[in-house]
Amino acid sequence: MTEKKKAETRTPKTKKAETAPKKEKAPKEDLVVFAIRLTEPERKAIHDAAGPRNATQFVRAVALAAAREDDAAFKNAISEARKLRA
């Protein structure tokens, strides 16, 4: 009987105030996962080189530079990692 009583004493929810329409976001790239297995020392070396917040970007830049045989992009990724460590 207490369940009925609780249901009866509830106040109806009020409508939320209207908010401004949300901005449309640009469509995101369709990304896929490319996972590699690393030993703990390899992972630590990557984090030491790029910093923990930039490790993914660093690995991605280096891998793409190697795949494209782009020496300038490879050197740029290393240079950016050095700046972030400083």
Image (cartoon, helix red, strand yellow):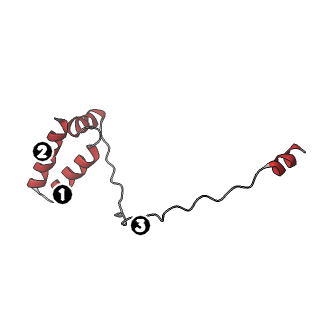
Could you say where residue 67 lies in the image, as x and y percent from the top left? 18, 57
Q: Dividing the image into 4 quarters, which one contains the C terminus? A: top left
Q: Please name the amino acid that badge 1 sits on.
A: Ala
**Element marked by disc 1:** helix
Q: Earlier in the sequence, mark 2 or mark 1?
A: 1
Q: Residue at position x 26%, y 32% from top?
A: 41
Which amino acid type corresponds to the residue marked 3 in the rendered image?
A: Glu
Q: CA distance from mark 2 to mark 1?
A: 19 Å
Q: Tell me the residue that label 3 is attached to.
A: 24
Mark 1 is surrounded, within 10 Å at the Cα level, by few (under 14), some (14 to 19) or many (20 or more) other residues, namely few
The residue depicted at 65 percent of the width and 59 percent of the height is 15
Q: Vertical placement of 69 versus 45: above or below?
A: below
| Badge number at residue 4 | none
Separation of residues labelled 3 and 1 (CA atoms): 35 Å
Whole-percent x, y for residue 37 in the image: 32, 43
Do tag 2 and tag 1 residues touch (Cβ < 8 Å)?
no
Which of pointers 2 and 1 indicates the residue nearer the eye? 2
Q: Residue furthest right?
A: 1
Viewer-proximal residue, 12 or 84? 12
Quadrant position of residue 70: bottom left
Task: Please give the residue where the numbered disc 2 appears in the rendered image.
Answer: 79
Measured as percent of width and height from the top left, residue 14 is found at: 68, 57
Secondary structure of the residue carrying tag 2 is helix
What residue is pinned by disc 1? 67
In this view, the mark in front (2 or 3): 3
State the residue at coordinates (46%, 63%). 22
Q: Are marks 3 and 1 in contact (CB under 8 Å)?
A: no
